[in-house]
């Protein structure tokens, strides 16, 4: 249908049911029904954001219970990977520093 309009030079027409009928499915009544009503009750709100210092320790204990701790084998593997990465990076920095100092020595000391 839209190909025919494009071939004859007309504008493409929408193909959805709402667009063809021209009726809007959203009314102001349905919009008002979905609105959130803010309740301004001071007894419901807590004066301290985050619950204050008394709730800190129980929250920490609760969050620590959710942590997935690595096994001893995983810790050894992670440690080896970190040391290998440090060795590679240290070697890279050392080599670049050595080449740069040789270059500067060659330019400044003929």
Image: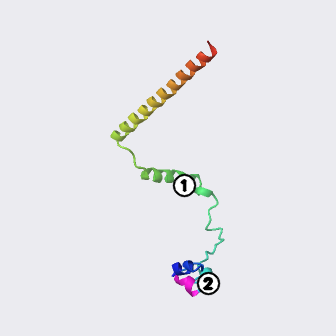
Asked if the magenta segment contains residue 6, the reply would be: no
Q: How many marks?
A: 2
Magenta highlight: main SS: helix
First to last magenta residue range: 15-21
Residue highlighted by disc 2 = 27
- Who's the residue at 36% across and 38% down the image? 77
* Left or right, residue 36 beside residue 95: right
Q: Residues within 10 Å of mark 2 (few under 14, many from 20)?
A: few
Q: Are marks 1 and 2 in contact (CB under 8 Å)?
A: no
Q: Secondary structure at mark 1?
A: helix
- Who's the residue at 49% across and 28% down the image? 92
Residue 54 appears in the figure: yes
The image position of residue 53, as x and y in percent, is 58, 51
Locate the C terminus and report the quarter of the image it occupies.
top right
The image position of residue 103, as x and y in percent, is 57, 20
> Upstream in the sequence, badge 1 or badge 2?
2
- Who's the residue at 43% across and 35% down the image? 82
When the figure is inspected, residue 83 is found, relative to residue 64, above or below; the finding is above
Residue highlighted by disc 1 = 55
When the figure is inspected, residue 9 is found, relative to residue 89, above or below; the finding is below
Q: CA distance from mark 1 to mark 2?
A: 45 Å
- Who's the residue at 56% across and 23% down the image? 100
Residue 15 appears in the figure: no
């Amino acid at each position: 249908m839209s190909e025919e309009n494009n071939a004859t030079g007309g504008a493409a027409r929408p193909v959805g049911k709402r667009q063809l009928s021209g009726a809007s499915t959203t009314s102001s009544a349905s919009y008002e029904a979905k609105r959130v009503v803010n309740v301004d009750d001071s007894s419901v709100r807590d004066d301290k954001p985050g619950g204050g210092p008394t709730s800190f320790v129980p929250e920490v204990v609760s969050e620590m219970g959710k942590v997935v701790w690595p096994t001893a084998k995983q810790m050894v593997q992670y440690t080896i990977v970190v040391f290998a990465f440090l060795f590679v990076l240290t070697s890279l920095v050392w080599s670049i520093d050595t080449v740069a100092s040789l270059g500067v020595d060659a330019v400044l000391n003929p």
